[in-house]
Image (cartoon, rainbow, N blue to C red):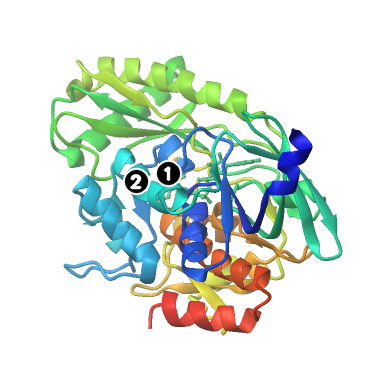
C-alpha cells in the first residue's frame, strides 16, 4: 500500500510549509502552469499569520507620511492583501514613523489564503510533515513525509522550503546559518470586555503597569519585557495583546517547552492586567494563539546571503526578484524592538540568489527562511515580504522544474512583481 502510493506522488514543484510564503509560492505556481503540491505539518494553513495570530500585514507599503499609503507590493500578492482587507473589512493604518500596515482578521486571512491552497489544487496536504530527503546530483529526488494515512514519498522536480528553520536544508545536510541566540518570541491573545475604545491610552497603560511591577520586583511579570496591543485590533470591547518574553531561544531549544512557557505567561499576564489596568478589570479571554510567535530560527545558505547593509541601503540588484520595505525590527535584549530605518519612500530588492540553495540544485527558499543574516531577516520576515519572496521562489522553481531558463524567470518576475 505504502509502496503503491510512493509511485503515485509526483509533482513539478513541492512547497513545504503553507504559511504566508507558501501561499505566495502557490500563487506563482498557479500562474506558471507547473503542477505543484503543498503540505504543512499543522492542521490548518497560514503558519505564524494564523497560528501565532500576529494580526497585521507589514511590508506591503512604503514608509511615508502621506495621507494615503503607497504600495510596495504589486501583482497578485498585492491583490491578496486587498482581498484580506475586503474580507475582514479592515483598512490600512499608519503608525509611528510613517509605517503603514494592514490589520487583518485571522478568519479573513484564512479564508482568502485557502483559495489557491485548497480551491485551485487537489494536491494539498495538512498534518503532513517532511521527515527526510534523498538527494542525488540533480537535486532532491525524493521527499519522505509522515501523514495521518501513514508515511509516503514524493518525487518533485523542485522543492521550495517555506517551513522556516531551514528544515529542508538540514534534512539534506546542507549548510545553515546558526545564531547563538534568536530574537525574543511573543505570545498573542485576544481579550473581551475591555472598557475603553482608545488604543492610544490602553497600550501605554499596560506598559506603565508592567514597568511599575518590574521595578518593584513583582514575580508575576518576571518573564515579560514588553506588552503591546495589535494595531487596529481594539474594537467592540475586544483587543489583541502581544506579550514579548525576556527569554531568547537558543539553538536546539525545545519548541514545545517554549509554547508551554508562552501559554503560562499569557494566563499570568491576563490576571495581572485585570488587577492593574482599569480598562481590563473585567476582561475575559477570547482566545490564546495556539503557537508562541517564534521570530527567527536557523536559515539556509543560498547563493547569496542578504545583508543588513543591502537592506538599509535600499539596494536594487539587477537580479532582484522580491520586494522588502519594512525596517529592521530586531527584538534583542532591550525593552522593545530596536528599529533601523530605510529612507522614507524606499524599498530594497531581494536577489534571486538569496532564494536559491548554494548546495542543492532545484532547492529554493522563501519567507522567514530565506538566506539572510539575522539583521536582514529582522526586516524580510514580515508577511508582506514573505508573500513576495514566496511568489518569486515559486516562479523560479516552476521555471527550473519545467526546464526553462532562470534568466527568463527573473525577467518575468521583474516585469510583473516589482514596483516601477
Ligand atoms: C510574535 C510575532 C509577531 C509578528 N508580527 C508581525 C506583524 O505584525 N506583521 C507582519 O507582517 N509580520 C509579523 N511577524 C512576522 C511574520 O508573522 C512571520 O515571519 C511570517 O508569517 C512567516 O511566514 P512564513 O510563511 O515564512 O513561515 P511560517 O508562518 O512559520 O510558516 C511555516 C509553515 O511551515 C510548516 N512546517 C514547519 N516545518 C514543517 C515540516 N517539517 N513539514 C511540513 N510543514 C512544516 C509550519 O507548520 C508552518 O505552517 C511576526 C512574527 C512573530 C513571531
Please determine whether, in this image, residue 412 is positioned above or below residue 9. Answer: below
Quadrant in which the N terminus is drawn: top right
Residue sitting at x 48%, y 73%: 348
Please determine whether, in this image, residue 394 is positioned above or below residue 41. Answer: below
CB at disc 1 and ligand 1 closer than 8 Å: yes
Quadrant in which the C terminus is drawn: bottom left
**Can you identify the residue that label 2 sits on?**
109
Between the residue at mark 1 and the residue at mark 2, the CA separation in whole angstroms equals: 8 Å
Q: Secondary structure at mark 2?
A: helix
Q: In the shown orientation, is residue 361 left or right of residue 397?
A: right
x then y, percent, for residue 100 = 29, 60
Q: Is residue 96 visible?
A: no
Q: Nearer the viewer, residue 24 or 182?
A: 24
Q: In the shown orientation, is residue 6 left or right of residue 309?
A: right
**Can you identify the residue that label 1 sits on?**
49
Q: Nearer the viewer, residue 115 or 76?
A: 115
Amino acid at each position: 500500500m505504502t509502496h503503491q502510493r510512493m509511485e503515485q506522488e509526483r509533482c513539478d514543484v513541492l512547497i513545504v510549509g503553507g504559511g504566508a510564503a507558501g501561499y505566495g509560492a502557490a500563487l506563482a505556481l498557479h500562474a506558471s502552469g507547473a503542477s505543484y503540491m503543498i503540505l504543512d505539518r499543522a492542521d490548518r494553513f497560514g503558519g505564524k499569520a494564523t497560528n501565532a495570530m500576529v494580526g497585521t500585514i507589514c511590508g506591503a507599503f512604503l514608509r511615508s507620511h502621506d495621507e494615503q499609503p503607497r504600495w510596495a507590493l504589486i501583482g497578485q500578492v498585492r491583490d491578496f492583501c486587498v482581498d484580506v482587507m475586503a474580507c475582514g473589512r479592515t483598512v490600512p493604518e499608519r503608525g509611528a514613523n510613517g509605517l503603514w500596515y494592514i490589520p487583518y482578521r485571522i478568519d479573513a486571512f484564512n479564508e482568502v489564503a485557502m483559495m489557491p491552497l485548497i480551491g485551485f489544487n487537489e494536491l494539498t496536504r495538512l498534518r503532513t510533515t517532511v521527515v527526510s530527503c534523498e538527494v542525488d546530483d540533480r537535486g532532491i529526488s525524493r521527499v519522505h513525509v509522515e501523514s495521518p494515512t501513514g508515511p509516503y514519498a514524493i518525487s518533485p522536480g523542485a522543492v521550495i522550503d517555506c517551513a522556516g528553520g531551514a528544515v529542508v536544508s538540514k534534512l539534506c545536510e546542507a549548510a545553515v546559518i546558526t545564531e547563538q541566540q534568536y530574537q525574543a518570541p511573543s505570545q498573542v491573545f485576544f481579550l473581551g470586555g475591555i472598557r475603553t475604545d482608545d488604543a492610544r491610552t490602553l497600550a501605554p497603560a499596560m506598559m506603565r503597569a508592567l514597568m511599575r511591577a518590574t521595578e518593584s520586583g513583582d514575580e508575576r511579570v518576571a518573564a515579560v519585557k514588553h506588552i503591546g496591543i495589535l494595531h487596529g485590533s481594539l474594537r467592540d470591547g475586544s483587543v489583541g495583546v502581544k506579550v514579548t518574553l525576556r527569554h531568547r531561544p537558543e539553538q536546539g531549544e525545545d519548541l514545545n517547552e517554549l509554547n508551554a512557557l508562552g501559554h503560562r505567561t499569557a494566563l499570568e499576564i491576563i490576571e495581572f492586567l485585570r488587577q492593574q489596568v482599569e480598562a481590563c478589570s473585567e476582561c475575559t479571554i477570547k482566545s490564546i494563539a495556539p503557537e508562541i510567535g517564534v521570530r527567527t530560527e536557523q536559515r539556509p545558505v543560498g547563493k547569496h546571503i542578504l545583508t543588513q547593509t543591502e537592506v538599509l541601503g535600499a539596494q536594487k540588484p539587477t537580479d532582484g526578484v522580491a520586494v522588502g520595505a519594512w525596517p529592521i525590527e530586531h527584538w534583542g535584549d532591550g525593552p522593545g524592538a530596536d528599529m533601523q530605518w530605510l529612507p522614507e519612500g524606499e524599498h530594497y530588492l531581494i536577489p534571486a540568489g538569496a532564494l536559491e540553495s548554494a548546495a542543492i540544485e532545484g532547492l529554493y527558499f522563501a519567507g522567514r527562511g530565506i538566506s539572510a543574516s539575522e539583521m536582514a531577516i529582522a526586516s524580510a520576515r514580515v508577511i508582506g515580504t514573505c508573500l513576495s519572496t514566496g511568489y518569486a521562489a515559486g516562479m523560479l522553481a516552476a521555471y527550473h522544474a519545467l526546464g526553462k531558463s532562470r534568466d527568463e524567470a527573473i525577467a518575468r518576475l521583474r516585469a510583473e512583481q516589482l514596483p516601477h
